[in-house]
Image (cartoon, rainbow, N blue to C red):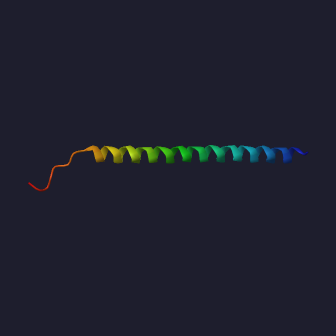
Amino acid sequence: MTEDEQRKICEREEIATRVAAFRATQERFRREREEYFVSTLENARKVERPSLWP
């Protein structure tokens, strides 16, 4: 295997590692957004609203 081929293999592995890390980060952000939405909605539903009718 030539030096050029080995360099290309290393670069591909590095790219694959970076893509995997990026996807994991995006998935974490998606989960955090979902958790924030659910907790905010639950808190909003707990608040007592004043009656509009006397």
Q: Is residue 46 left or right of residue 29?
A: left
Q: Is residue 53 left or right of residue 41?
A: left
Residue 20 locus on image (x, y percent): 65, 45
Q: Along the line of sight, which residue is nearer the eye, 8 or 32? A: 32
Q: Residue furthest right?
A: 1
Q: Residue at x 55, y 47 (%)?
A: 26
Look at 21% across and 45% down and name the residue there.
48
**In the current view of this chain or complex, which residue is farthest to the bottom?**
53
Figure quadrant of the C terminus: bottom left
Tally of numbered discs:
0
Q: Is residue 17 left or right of residue 45?
A: right
Residue 52 occupies quadrant: bottom left
Q: Residue furthest front?
A: 54
**Residue at the image point whose x is 85% and y is 48% from the top:** 5
Q: Residue furthest left?
A: 54
Q: Where in the figure is residue 22, as x and y percent of width and height?
A: 60, 46
Residue in the foreground of this view, choosing between 45 and 40: 45
Tell me where residue 10 appears, x and y as whole percent.
Answer: 78, 43
Q: Camera-side residue: 53 or 34?
A: 53
Left or right? Give the position of 25 relative to 12: left
Q: Is residue 53 above or below residue 31?
A: below
Q: How far across and how far down the image is residue 21, in percent?
A: 62, 43
Q: Quadrant of the N terminus?
A: top right
